[in-house]
Amino acid sequence: METIHWNVEGMSCSNCVLTISKYLEKKGLEDVKVSLAGGDVSFLSNGGVEKKEIKKGIEDLGYRVAEEAQDGKPAAGYRSGVFANQYFTRLLFCLPFTILLMLHMADKWMPIHWLMNPWVQLVLCLPVYITGMSFFGRSAIQSIRNGMPNMNVLISIGASAAFLYSLAGSLLQLGPSYLFYETSAAIITLIFLGNFLEDVSIRSTQKALNSLARSQKVRANMIAFDEHHQELIFPVDNSQLRSGDLVLIKSGEEVPADCKILWGTASVNEAIITGESLPVAKAAKDKLIGGSLVIDGTVKAQVTAAAKDSVLSTIINLVKRAQGDKPPVQQMAEKISAVFVPVVLIIAALTFVMNYFFLHQLTPSIMRSIAVLVIACPCAMGLATPAAIAVGLGRAAKSGILFRDAKSLEQFKNIRQAVFDKTGTLTTGEFVISDFQILDEISADDFKQTAFSLEKYSNHPIAKCISNEWKSQASLSWSNVEEVKGVGIKATALSGDLYQAGSYAMAKDLTSDDSHNVYIIKNKKLLGWIDMRDEIRPEAAAVVGYLHSKNIKTFLLSGDRLAKCKQIAAELGIDEVIAEQSPEQKLDRITGLSAQIPTAMIGDGINDAPALAKATIGISMSDASNIALQTADVVLMSHGLKKLPLSLGLGKHTFLTIKQNLFWAFFYNVIAIPVAAFGLLTPAVAALSMGLSDVMLVLNSTRLFVKKVE
C-alpha cells in the first residue's frame, strides 16, 4: 500500500470535500483524508487504479491537482504568488468590464449615454459571463453529475438568470428596465473577489505548517572523498541526501537532515521542532534534528534519515492528516451542507413565486430570488471546523505539541481527571546511583558486573542508568534472558545459575526491607541492592496547580513503592496515589477511570503504551526521535511537561472557536436569506456579503495564533 499526498486547488466548501471524498472512495481507495483548509488530499493506494486516472477524475469534477513535490522541486502544476491565484487572475480580467457596466448606473450625475445601449452592455458583460461560467458553471455541472451539488450551482443559476433575463430584454427590445447585465457581471466579479479574500485568509491559517515546511528545503555541505582519500565538500539540496551520507554543518546553518554527530560540538536551537527557544549543547554521538539551527560550532555528521523520512517531515504529515480528520462536532455541519444547495434552490423558487404573487412584478421578483441564491453560503458551515482546526493544530505543532487526530482537540473540553506516570513524567527520568549495598561474599566489581549484565537488556530508565554507569567490558553470558514487564530482568547463565534484577516484587520473599530501587538476586539468594535518585521536574508543581485551577482531579499512577509515590504526591499536591502497579494493573486502572469520567493519561510512552491507548486522551512525553508512538493521542515534544497547560488550552479554545464559527455560519444564513427574500439588498451586495462572511469566519479562527489559551 502506498500513501499518496496531493494538493487540490478549487475546493471552496464542504460540498467540495464530500465530492472528492466520495469519488476517491468509489475508486476503492482507503483512508481518504481531504482537508478544506489546506487543500490537502491523502489516500492509500494498492496500485489497482492508476494515479493518472485518479487525477483526471478529480479534475473532471472541476478541481485542479498539483501532485506532491519530488526531490525538493515544486510539484507539477504548482503555482505560487498572488498573480498565480486562480481567483485573482479572473478577478483582474473581469473587473474593468464590470466597472464600465456599473458606470451606467451613475447616469444621473455623469451621463454616459453610449453605455445605455443594450448591445454595448451585452458586449461588456459577455467576457465576464463566459469567464464565470467556465469556472463556476463547469464546477456546478460536474457536482450535479456527481450527485452532490455545490455552492457554484447557486452562483451559476443566479448569474445566468440575470444574464438571460437581460438578453431576452435586449432581443425583444423591452427597454432599460429589463437590462441587468451589470448584476450578472457584479455577481461573478464579486464572488471572485470573495473567493480570493477567502483563499488568502485560509492560507494564513496554514502559516505555522508552512513555516515548518520551508525548513525542510535547505542546502547541505556534503562530504565526499576523491581517489586520494582527500576530503571534498560540495553543496547539494538536502532532498538529495540519503541515510549514511556525511555532511558538514557550520555555525549559522540549518541542519539539513536528521543525523548523528561524528565530530565536533555545537549549540543548537531546536525551536522549530520542540518549541524550546534555549539552545541545546550537542557533542559526538548526539542526534541532530533536521530543520534545527546551529547557533555556534561546527560539526561533521552522518545522515540517519532521508528528507522524506525525517522527524520534521513526519511532523508535517502528521499535522496534515489531523487537519483532514472530522471531529464529531463537524458531522452536524456536514449533514446540513449536504442538503444546503437543494434547500436554497427551493427557497429561491418560493421567493420568486411569493414576491410575484404579492407584487405582480416580474423584475423585482427575479432580482430577489437571485439575491437569495448568491447570498446563501454553505462555505461558512464547511469552513467553521477546518479553519479552526488548521490554526489550532498549526500553533500546537509550532509549540512542540503534536495531535494525532482532530478528535483529540475536541475531547480536551471534557477532561475532568489527569493521571500521571511518575518516572520520566513528573520526574526527569535521569537517574543516578546514590548508593548500593552488597550482602553476600562477592566483590564490588563482580556485583557491578552482574547488575550491568542483567540491566543492559532493559530500556527502563533505572536499568539504562545502571548499565551506563557500571558499563563493563567483561559482561556475563546468558543462555536465556527474559524481561518481566514492570518487575525486572531474569536471566539464566551458561552454568545454569538463575540471576534476577528488579523491584521489591522480586525480592519480597528474601527481605522485608522495601526501601530500595533494585535488588540483585542469584539462585533465590539476595546479593545486594541499589538505591537511585531521580529529581522532580521543576515545572511539575506548576502544572499540577494549573490542573487544579481548572477543577481537574489529579492522580499519580506508578509501579514504584507506595512510600516514594506518596512523598512525591505530597510535594506536588497530587490528589490521589495508586502505587506498585504492573503495566497490566495500570491498564485496568485507566480503563476503569476513563469509563467513569473523561480521563487524560500522561506518561513517557515506554512502559505506559497500553494505558495511554485506553485513556480518553493519551498524552506522551517523548523525545522528537520517538514521535511515531502510535498509542498516544498527543505527543509533548522534548519531554515537555510544561506544555501540558498549552495543549489543554489549545484543545478547549479550538473547540470554542469552532462553536463560534458554527454559530456565525448558521446565524448568517438564517438572517441573510430572509433579508434577500424581502428585497432589502441587491444581488451585487448579496454576492459581496457572501464572500465576506467566509473571511470573517477565517479571521476569527486565526485569532488562535495569538490568543492566550492557558
Image (cartoon, rainbow, N blue to C red):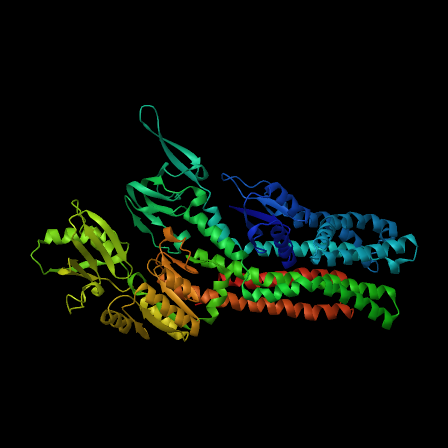
Total count of labels: 0
Q: Residue at image x 91%, y 58%?
A: 175
Residue 676 % position (x, y)? 75, 67
Q: Residue at image x 54%, y 44%?
A: 68
Left of 190 or right of it: where is 644? left
- Is 634 above or below relative to 478? below
Residue 447 % position (x, y)? 13, 54
Residue 462: name its quadrant. Answer: bottom left
Residue 135 % position (x, y)? 71, 49
Left of 38 or right of it: where is 398? left
Quadrant position of the C terminus in the picture: bottom left
Q: Which of the two residues, 470 or 209, is positioned nearer the viewer here?
A: 470
- Is 663 above or below relative to 42? below
Q: Find the residue positioned furthest to the front.
A: 496
Residue 44 % position (x, y)? 54, 48
Q: Which of the two residues, 522 or 672, is positioned nearer the viewer here?
A: 522
Residue 565: name its quadrant. Answer: bottom left
Q: Find the residue positioned furthest to the top.
A: 227
Q: Is residue 102 visible?
A: no
Q: Find the residue positioned furthest to the left.
A: 441
Left of 110 or right of it: where is 526? left
